[in-house]
């Protein structure tokens, strides 16, 4: 193994959080920084010739290569796990920018009470209402503490939207159920595709409070506080699973990378897969990281501070592979690494409308939301579930390979002339009402290392033990009934309800919003990091990303990930570097 | 080599020079293209072309798999990294007897799935359409058929850069305009009205289209 010259800080992962931290450190400190990214170099200009559905939306060119590495899955700790052999339920990224390059740019914040979920739920409904095997906890952070960091995240991205609550004052046209914001959105709402306008009208008719989906594909050209400019969205419809052709969609490569590349103190190394965080157990210190480069050469990079900002599941895997902290054991409840695995509860309803929708136009994040059934905005006293989610009709550009073939139930054929004719007739007349719901944590949903399967380097794969519970099933049933009413109000001739939540389905794209494993909290017995992302075990190790989130909020997590990364950066720069010790 | 007989599509007809159009009937002439095969034998290609044509027929509703060149698309995909499962996790052991929700757990890659499926379709291209449909109904729950059906849809509607959707016939059929760089002025107009701009392909809009993965790096 090659011993490399010492750097002050090493950052694992060149995505949103890694580049954000590199930028903050370079801006505010003289530290030398190495960023290690397992995938290749990418830049915003690479995407100009990439509007190819097959290559990006079907063959998933921007995603992690499952030929090298995947995860295994089982439903309970009694089962034997098998590998998820092809991309499906989530889509991890690969290369500079990570999944932040191919994301859809849907940018809501979490509801304000999510951070105190245990306390608030018990206050309103009593402890007995929580499911018997729940692992619901408070995060150790309150809305007022995190809100300023959300605002910084919104400004970094130039999020388009309409505030519904500024400092407690409700504003018509925004989301009245959101936590109070300190400011209006950086850019005004995006233009709406027809299907979203139909949904908006339907929601109003039913007495709900529709509002524009917060979007990091800004409606107008935008210059962020760092002086980085991007054009406004052109509604080409190639967002989700693509890099943006014109650089409008906020991506690490068009917001943070240009700044980081300018900094002499930062070196970004591509094709470097970190295999272990090396630490001194006695001194309780991480001493650096061990990684393998594109040529297969192993190196040890010593550093004073280690930042772990890989894709959410890989954060957990790297701690387990490194032997940092105690692996969670569901039988005893002991150990913390791997606990509180959650996945967003997504339940799409397809709506047949007898009008052409021109669905090729749009952006994944332009649309209309309804949050009347989000979080605890509605009374759950007499409902068979806790929490809720947001309905969303977005203008995700309909691309034909993945969307052709939806036919009304009267057509039984799935091939041949009858099917073909019906599928052509209905091709541009089917909309989707999305529902994104919270997934509370359970003692039985967790991660550890798989005893049977290994990656291409010979390291054990991460094993997910994950299944849906009654709370999710009942929430989806409730949401589907509401979606049905909304669909009827949109003029639906036919409705295809959300797929079954009987069993977790590794084939269907759920979302890339899988969370937990290295959760934050107020005690080392029940969490992996403190509310600043600092490891309880090794105080010079900081973990960033959704792996630190103890619950899955309904909202898509990127702005929350950015907010917590900014909070970690402030704590490190303002306090830790001055006095390297556990933060409190 | 595979002979792809197809009618000149609407777009091409519009684009023809005036001399070409003069003196010709409205019925466009058939063109025959000879396209080299990368994976299939000629016999296999004829069978897959025939089967894809029953899945997505050429009929009163418009052109189908034959005009789009679906078999050319599939041939290239099978010859490329997808055909050999380059990006699928293929470590042993392969467990079976699991619920379907765990996704495909088999060992066979797409090339092997096709070769296995073709064994049961000898002489398929010589059957009548009704006999072909009958034969396909017998295998419609097989992995081979579901793969072929999925690949047929891909070959109908992918960018022509991949060998299918020749002359953008698939896109014309459903009114998809392809990679249109900006819909800024159109997104919130045309509410309730079909807006069908003339399709463009990736090569037409970009000087440097991303190189298809089946063409290698």
Image: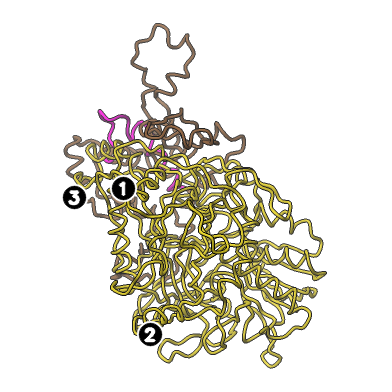
Q: What stretch is highlighted in magenta?
A: B55-79
Residue at the image point whose x is 69% and y is 49% from the top = A223
Q: Mark 1 points at which residue?
A: A351
Residue at the image point whose x is 35% and y is 75% from the top = A75
Label pair 3/1, CB-CB below 8 angstroms: no
Q: Which chain is brown?
A: B
The chain carrying label 2 is A
The chain carrying label 1 is A
Query: Mark 1 or 2, which is nearer the eye?
Result: 2
The chain carrying label 3 is B
Q: Mark 2 points at which residue?
A: A127
Residue A90's x, y, as percent? 46, 62
Q: Mark 3 points at which residue?
A: B138
A188 vs A498, left or right, is right
Q: The yellow chain is which one?
A: A
Q: Is residue A35 above or below residue A425?
A: below
Are dots 3 and 1 on a single chain? no
Residue at the image point whose x is 50% and y is 46% from the top = A363
Q: Which of A330 and A167 is in front in this view?
A: A167
B146 vs A135, left or right, is left
């Amino acid at each position: 193994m090659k011993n490399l010259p010492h750097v002050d800080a090493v950052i694992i992962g060149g995505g949103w959080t890694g580049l954000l931290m590199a930028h903050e450190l370079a801006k505010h400190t003289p530290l030398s920084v190495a960023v290690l990214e397992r995938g290749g170099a990418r830049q915003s200009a690479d995407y100009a010739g990439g509007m190819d559905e097959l290559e990006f939306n079907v063959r998933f060119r921007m995603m992690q290569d499952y030929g090298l590495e995947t995860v295994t899955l089982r439903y309970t700790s009694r089962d034997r796990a098998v590998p998820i052999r092809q991309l499906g339920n989530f889509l991890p990224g690969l290369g500079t920018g990570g999944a932040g390059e191919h994301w859809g740019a849907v940018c809501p914040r979490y509801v304000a009470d999510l951070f105190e979920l245990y306390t608030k739920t018990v206050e309103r409904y009593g402890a007995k209402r929580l499911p018997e095997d729940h692992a619901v906890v408070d995060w150790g952070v309150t809305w007022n503490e995190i809100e300023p960091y959300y605002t910084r995240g919104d400004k970094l991205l130039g999020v388009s939207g309409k505030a519904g609550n500024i400092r407690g004052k409700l504003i018509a046209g925004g989301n009245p159920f959101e936590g109070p914001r300190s400011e209006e959105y950086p850019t005004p709402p995006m233009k709406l595709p027809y299907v979203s306008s139909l949904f908006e009208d339907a929601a109003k008719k039913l007495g709900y409070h529709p509002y524009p989906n917060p979007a990091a594909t800004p409606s107008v050209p935008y210059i962020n506080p760092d002086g980085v400019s991007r054009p406004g969205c052109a509604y080409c419809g190639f967002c989700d699973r693509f890099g943006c052709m014109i650089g409008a969609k906020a991506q690490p490569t068009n917001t943070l990378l240009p700044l980081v590349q300018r900094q002499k103190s930062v070196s970004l190394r591509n094709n470097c897969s970190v295999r272990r965080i090396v630490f001194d157990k006695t001194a309780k210190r991480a001493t650096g990281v061990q990684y393998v480069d594109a040529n297969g050469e192993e190196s040890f990079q010593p550093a004073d501070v280690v930042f772990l900002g890989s894709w959410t599941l890989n954060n957990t895997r790297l701690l387990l592979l490194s032997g940092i902290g105690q692996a969670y054991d569901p039988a005893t409840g002991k150990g913390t690494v791997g606990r509180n695995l959650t996945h967003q509860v997504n339940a799409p309803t397809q709506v047949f409308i007898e009008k052409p929708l021109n669905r090729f136009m749009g952006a994944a994040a332009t649309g209309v939301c309804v949050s009347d059934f989000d979080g605890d905005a509605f009374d759950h006293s007499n409902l068979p579930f806790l929490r809720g989610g947001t309905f969303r009709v977005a203008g995700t550009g309909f691309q034909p390979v993945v969307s052709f073939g939806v036919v009304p139930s009267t057509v039984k054929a799935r091939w041949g002339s009858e099917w073909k004719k019906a599928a052509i007739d209905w091709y541009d007349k089917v909309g989707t009402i999305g529902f994104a719901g919270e997934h509370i944590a359970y003692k039985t949903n967790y991660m550890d290392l798989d005893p049977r399967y290994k990656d291409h380097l010979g390291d054990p794969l991460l094993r997910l033990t994950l299944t849906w519970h009654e709370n999710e099933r009942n929430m989806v049933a409730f949401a589907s009934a509401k979606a049905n009413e909304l669909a009827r109000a949109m003029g639906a001739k036919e409705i295809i309800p959300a797929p079954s939540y009987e069993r977790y389905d590794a084939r269907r794209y759920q979302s890339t919003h899988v969370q937990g494993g290295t959760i934050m909290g107020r005690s080392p017995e029940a969490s992996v990091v403190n509310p600043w992302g600092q490891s309880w075990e090794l105080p010079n190790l900081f973990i960033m990303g959704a792996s630190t989130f103890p619950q899955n909020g309904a909202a898509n997590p990127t702005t929350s990930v950015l907010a917590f990364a900014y909070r970690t950066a402030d704590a490190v720069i303002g306090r830790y570097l001055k006095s390297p010790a556990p933060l409190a | 080599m595979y002979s792809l007989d197809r009618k000149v599509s609407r777009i091409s007809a519009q684009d023809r020079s005036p001399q070409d159009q003069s003196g010709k009937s409205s019925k466009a002439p058939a063109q025959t293209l000879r396209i080299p095969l990368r994976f299939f034998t000629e016999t296999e290609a004829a069978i897959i072309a025939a089967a894809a044509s029953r899945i997505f027929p050429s009929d009163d509703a418009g052109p189908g798999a034959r005009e789009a060149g679906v078999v050319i698309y599939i041939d290239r995909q099978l010859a490329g990294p997808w055909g050999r499962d380059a990006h699928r996790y293929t470590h042993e052991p392969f467990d079976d007897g699991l619920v379907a929700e765990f996704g495909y757990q088999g060992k066979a890659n797409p090339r092997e799935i096709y070769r296995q499926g073709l064994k049961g379709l000898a002489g398929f291209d010589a059957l009548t359409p009704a006999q072909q449909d009958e034969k396909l109904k017998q295998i419609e729950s097989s992995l081979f058929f579901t793969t072929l059906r999925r690949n047929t849809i891909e070959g109908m509607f992918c960018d022509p850069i991949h060998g299918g959707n020749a002359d953008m016939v698939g896109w014309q059929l459903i009114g998809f305009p392809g990679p249109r760089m900006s819909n800024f002025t159109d997104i919130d107009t045309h509410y309730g009205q079909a807006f069908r701009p003339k399709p463009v392909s990736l090569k037409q809009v970009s000087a440097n289209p991303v190189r298809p993965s089946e063409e290698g790096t």
